[in-house]
Amino acid sequence: MIDPVLLRENPDLIKRSQELRGESAALVDAAVEADAARRTAITVFEALRAEQNAFGKQVAQAPKEAKAALVAEAQELAARVKAANQAASDAEAEFTLAVQRLGNVVIDGVPAGGEDDFVVLREVGGIPAFDFEPRDHLEIGELLDAIDMQRGAKVSGARFHYLKGIGARLELAIMNMGLDRAIAAGFTPLITPTLVRPEIMQGTGYLGAHADEVYYLPEQELYLTGTSEVALAGYHADEIIDVSNGPIRYAGWSTCYRSEAGSHGKDTRGIIRVHQFNKLEMFTFIDPADAEAEHERLLGWQEGMLQDLGLTYRVIDTAAGDLGTSAARKYDVEAWVPTQNAYRELTSTSNCTTFQARRLEIRHRTETGKTAPVATLNGTLATTRWLVAILETHQRADGSVVVPEALRGYLGGLEVLEPIA
């Protein structure tokens, strides 16, 4: 949720943000009106309640013979106070609905436009060249007996798979490599719940435009998380936390679920776009003044992983219309996938400023002693999709795959993945 004071004092800034996102600026006017109605209703309620308190003292001090008439007036006033309280509650609910229709205010410099309007910040590494026709990751995975899509579909349906043998070991190796690096950077590991309550999912901003991508269990009133970011954000909900000595960082390891609504016909081969995968997610709670610097640090840790895995990649500054509700800025890191002759997203990192923390009531004490929302940031450090780029980039003509040196210690010193005869 955006800052109500900012909404009140600088609605034009929020309108510009909405326009950059390709969303309606009229929603800002509606939120401003709802805020004014809310404050008016609260003022009326508080005035009546003060009148009620003063009248109660008058009744208590009145002579016995006058009290009967005064009590009747007190009852009438109490009814008015109750009605005003309900009106204030209704106005608060209307304001909440109005302001939750607004995306986070984008940071200066974020490019305008949609999915194709990103800005490339840098490209790292040379495009892999082969003296043979390269295989795609699924063909390699089948040669290694590492990926089984057929049985995944048999058991669970389309876009499900098994990682088998060296495939399972390779994913665990990537995840453990990321976890070791996260711990060295000061992150506390968490294995998170993958089912969360609606208020937590709503608080992180995932029940907006992309709600149809989230799995929901209506009888239990629980959502399956598409990223451990959701459970990590909810970890300190309704708390005052101490970030005066630096950020609080968590590394969340979990299975993730996405319905991939609207992706029919896209990436149907292999494990690029699936319904279930594993992920190691970095998450930071921090003083808002330090959030942009932390964003660069998260990106640096991601790039360090890709460089040490020998992957060619680029970093893009995602356009405002492709940010998602909560992000004020998002960097995508896209690895080169040889058989697609294209960069494909492997990981991203988002600065959500105070947007999620306001919804989830996560605060810190400022130097004045007052409480204020913290900033939250997230970034993926390893996930199942990384196998795609690793297998394709490091393949050899005979179907074997060279293990990146940084990963060998997590595979018992294994240097080459050999096809199964």
Image (spheres, rainbow, N blue to C red):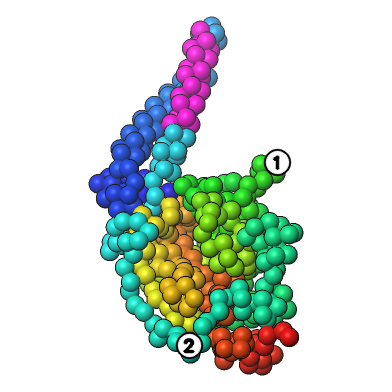
Query: In this orientation, which residue lies closer to the viewer: 260 or 229?
Result: 260
Whole-percent x and y of residue 318? 37, 63
Pointer 1 local density, CA inside 10 Å: few below 14, some 14–19, many at least 20: few
Q: Secondary structure at mark 1?
A: loop
Up-down relation of residue 343 to residue 217 (above or below): below
- On screen, residue 72 versus residue 257, left or right, reads left
In this rendering, which labeled residue sits more in front, label 1 or label 2? 2
Q: Magenta part of the protein: which range?
A: 69-91
The residue carrying pointer 2 sits among few (fewer than 14), some (14 to 19) or many (20 or more) residues within 10 Å by Cα, namely few
Horizontally, residue 200 falls left or right of residue 92, namely right
Question: In the image, what residue occupies the spot 47% across and 19% down?
Answer: 80
Which residue in the structure is indicated by mark 1? 219
Image quarter of residue 118:
bottom left
Q: Is residue 71 above or below residue 12?
A: above
Which quadrant: the C terminus?
bottom right
Q: Is residue 320 left or right of residue 248?
A: left
The residue lying at 66 percent from left, 91 percent from top is: 414
Q: Amino acid at mark 1?
A: Glu
Instruction: Tell me the residue that label 2 is attached to.
Output: 130
Residue type marked 2: Phe
User: In the rendered structure, does residue 123 fall within the stretch colored magenta?
Assistant: no
Badge 1 vs badge 2, beta-carbon distance below 8 Å: no
SS for callout 2: loop
Q: Main secondary structure of the magenta part?
A: helix
Residue in the picture at 66% in, 61% down: 160
Which residue is at a point 45% across and 85% down the rendered structure image?
Answer: 128
